Image (cartoon, rainbow, N blue to C red):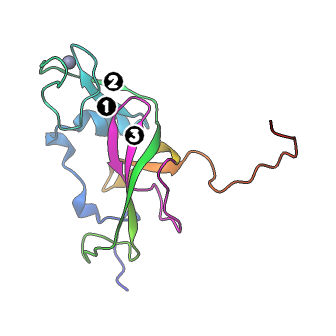
Amino acid sequence: MTTMLTSDWLLADSLAPDVSDDLLAPLYAAGARHELVLPFCGDCSLPLDLDQQVCDGCGAAEIAWRPVEKAGTVHSVTVMHRREPDLVVASDPYPILDVELASGHRLIMTTHARSESVPRVGDRVTVAFRELGGVPIPSATPAAPRHTVPLTTEARS
Ligand SMILES: [Zn+2]
């Protein structure tokens, strides 16, 4: 087992994006304040993909980054088994989640922390920020404990 100086549970710090010269600079700047901002069309307010430059709805090329609710639902789950010894520090397979946010955006992320269990499609998650080489990266935490059993004994209709 190799010991590596890293702040993240999954990736080596060398994979941190260069925030000074990045389309996603607003995302990282807000993440440092624990806020999630995502791109919308500056004209018609349609939610845009992170790398989208032109709106599908109206054709405008104006992007407005706005704060959104940090709540979403797991749309799909991929479990990554591939290992990259100098880049991926986790030794176990890890989940890659396609999360549908309340804002209408879709974001690809992994879990906030190493997890024994893999989130399931339909799980509600809250967006937090992993820190990768000092850069905040969106990640998912369960919005509520999973596999909970209702404690109430009240009859249900
Ligand atoms: Zn538009």
Q: Which mark is residue 38?
A: 1
Q: In the rendering, at what x and y percent does residue 12 appear? A: 29, 66
Residue 116 falls inside the magenta stretch: yes
CA distance separating discs 3 and 2:
17 Å
Magenta part of the chain = 97-122
Between marks 1 and 3 in the image, the one whose residue lies nearer the viewer: 3
Viewer-proximal residue among 31 and 45 = 45
Looking at the image, tell me whether mark 1 or mark 3 is earlier in sequence order. 1
CA distance separating discs 1 and 3:
13 Å
Q: Residue furthest bottom?
A: 1
Residue matched to label 3: 100
Viewer-proximal residue among 78 and 111 = 78
Label 2 packing within 10 angstroms: few (<14), some (14-19), many (20+): some
Q: Amino acid at mark 1?
A: Leu
Q: Is residue 72 above or below residue 44?
A: below
Q: Which mark is residue 157?
A: none
Do the residues bearing badges 1 and 2 touch, measured as CB atoms within 8 Å? yes
Q: Secondary structure at mark 3?
A: strand
Residue matched to label 2: 66
Q: Residue furthest top?
A: 43
Residue 81 falls inside the magenta stretch: no
Q: Is residue 119 above or below residue 69?
A: below
Q: Residue furthest front?
A: 157
Give the number of callouts.
3
| Mark 2 sits near ligand 1, with its Cβ under 8 Å away | no
